[in-house]
Every structure is written in C-alpha cells, then in structure tokens.
Amino acid sequence: MDTQLLFDTAMLAGEIMLCSGAETYRVEDTMHHILKTADDAEIIEVLVLMTGISATLKRTGEMPVSIVKRVASRGTNLSRVVEVNEISRRYCGQYLTVEQAYDMLLELKGEKHNGSLHPIAIAGACAGFTLMFGGRLTDAALAAVVGAFLALCLFCGKKLEFHAFIQDVTSSVGVAFISIVLKAIIGTPMNMDIVMISAIMPLVPGMAITNAVRDTLQGDYISGAARTLEAFLKAAGIALGIGIGIAIFSNIFLKGGR
C-alpha cells in the first residue's frame, strides 16, 4: 500500500470534516480508522485542533512519518461530514480502494453550493423564527425581507473578504438598519423587537456552542476552549452590531428613539 496516498486520503478526509463543522474527536476517529488500514501499522497518532491537523504513522521496520496540515477556514456543512463518514466506512470495510476513496474525497471537496438558494433559506429561517417567537404573519413576512437583506450583507462581506468578526458586526448593523427603516415606514403594526431578534438568529453561533460542549465532554479541552471563545466573539460581534445600528438609526428614522 502506498503510504503517502494513505496519508493524503486521511488528511483530506480530516480537512473536509474540520472545515465543515465536525467535532475534533470525530475527525480524529475517522482519520485513525483510515490510517489503521496500513499494512503492519505499529504506531498511529492523530491530533486535531481547530486550526490544524497532525498525524503520525509508523510501520514495522520503517521510520515514523508525520504530516501537519494547517486549516484556516471553517464553516458548517453537515452533509459533507456525513458523506466523508460514509466514504471512510466503505473504504475501511474494503468496499473501496484507497485510490477510489481519495478520488471521491477530492470530488467532494470540489463541490460548490448553489448560492442562489442561500437568500431564500435565510429569509425562510427568519420568517420561521418570527412565528416561533409569537410574531404575526405580517411580522414573519417583514422578517423574511430583513433576512434577504442579511443574506446580501453576508454575500458582500464574503466578496470583500471581511474578517469573520467584522462581518458579524456589519451584518448585524445591516439587520438593525433595515428593521428600523421598515418600522419607520409601517409603524405600529410591526413588532420590531421580534423581527430584529428573528433576523439575527441565522448569525447565532449554535453549532460552535454545541461543538464546544461536545469537545469538552470528550476531554478535548483545548478545542473546547477555542470553540467557546469563537462562539463568544461571534455573539459579541452580533450584539455590538445591533447596538451600533439601534443607537445610530433609531435616532434618525424613529421619533423618540424607538
């Protein structure tokens, strides 16, 4: 078996999972199972942090080989995590060769999202949260409009390559701005608080918080602490942006501030 190709397969699987929002222990487990298929494997060590992956393999009679890979960006795509798990299971069950598994992972990494559905998904999520929080159908429709504007802010921030914290702040300012403008136009029938809260829900770091708890419970305290800090910074950015937006635009568009 080609040791380098096996390493590349394991590292690629780990990179896709980590970039897609998988917990560190899940990434380590998947990579360990892939590397364990090496002939005469004597030592297998995998260490995954939020920003990098390290793996070591020693085969009987050979010098140990180690690879370190930096992972700069992370997001949420649970379907990719499921697909990598499926490819890993099929390979470890000898239904795939290492060459086939590597090619499938390369193809999976190269897949692109249908960006046209992103604004629709965000708008629908905002409308759904509005109804869940006790808003009326008119509030849900307005939240969908704010959600579409949020999607535009996120798209522009991505194109301009904003830092994640800056993008959270600017997107939240945008949510506050459009919510206040709609309130100024529509008036009393609009429940601005519910609409604004619902519109920021797609930004809330629910996945980061969940993974922080799961990593901590698994004993991965470094990753757990890092994810907790990431979630705190994201929440702080959202709160800061909403606060700035309300402070500036409520005095401009709303008489009496609100």
Image (cartoon, rainbow, N blue to C red):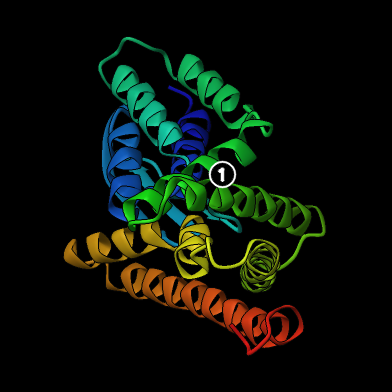
Taking 126 as reference, is 38 above or below it? above
Q: Quadrant of the C terminus?
A: bottom right
What residue type is disc 1 on? Ala
Q: Could one spot residue 221 in this view of the protein?
A: yes
Q: Mark 1 points at which residue?
A: 123
Q: Give the residue drawn at x 38%, y 22%.
A: 87
* Drawn side of residue 63 relative to residue 120, left or right: left
Q: Horizontal and vertical percent for residue 135?
A: 39, 55
Q: Residue 247's quadrant in the figure?
A: bottom right
Q: Give the residue drawn at x 44%, y 56%.
A: 54
- Given residues 114 and 89, the one toward you in this image is 114
Taking 108 as reference, is 220 above or below it? below
Q: Residue 6's quadrant in the figure?
A: top left
Q: Horizontal and vertical percent for residue 82?
A: 36, 31
Taking 194 as reference, is 233 above or below it? below
Q: Give the residue drawn at x 24%, y 65%.
A: 213
Return the residue found at the far front: 188
- Given residues 138 and 179, the one toward you in this image is 138
Q: Horizontal and vertical percent for residue 150?
A: 65, 55
